[in-house]
Image (cartoon, helix red, strand yellow):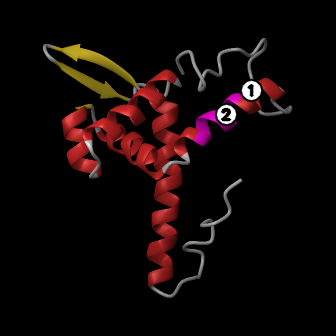
Amino acid sequence: MTAGVGSFESFEEPFDGSCDPSAEVLAEAAAAFGLLASSARLHLVWALAQGESDVSGLAERVGGALPAISQHLAKLKLAGLVRSRREGRRVVYLVDDPDVVTIVRLMVGQLADRRSDAGRGAGATAGRLRGLGA
């Protein structure tokens, strides 16, 4: 990841999962997950995981007002979860970290599958995370 809240490049040794991460790394991860705790920002990252877009395209896709979408993108950019580039007069946003894309797709995909399974009577796991916020 790039510098910012989501930067996990601060390990002194490679992290192999055999020991607990430092408090600093856990705090950075919590901050990154905190940003994604907003359904609007999560939707933006989901949309950008499908391909780059400008603010207008994102606002149309996620159904938000341009100023609100711009503010969410600014937070995600500051955290290093998305980046932008100029294309003439447009600013195009993208998620260029495959790990962020993987995490978002995995979590959203798992929950969508559970909801689908619950709809077919295979279990009552849908919605169990709702209301468990920290």
Magenta span: 28-34
Residue at x 44% of width, y 74% of height:
116
Secondary structure, magenta segment, majority class: helix
Q: Is residue 71 above or below residue 123?
A: above
Residue 108 belongs to magenta span:
no
Q: Quadrant of the N terminus?
A: top right
Disc 2 on helix, strand or loop?
helix
Residue at x 60% of width, y 25% of height:
5
Q: Position of residue 94 (x, y in %)?
A: 34, 28
Dot 2: within a 10 Å radius of its alpha carbon, few (fewer than 14), some, or many (20 or more) residues? some
Type of amino acid under label 1: Val
| Count of all numbered marks drawn on residues in the image | 2
Type of amino acid under label 2: Ala
Which residue was labeled with disc 2?
Answer: 29
Q: Is residue 93 above or below residue 50?
A: above
Disc 1 on helix, strand or loop?
helix
Residue at x 55% of width, y 74% of height:
126
- The answer to whether residue 16 is seen in the rendering is no
- The answer to whether residue 63 is seen in the rendering is yes
Dot 1: within a 10 Å radius of its alpha carbon, few (fewer than 14), some, or many (20 or more) residues? some
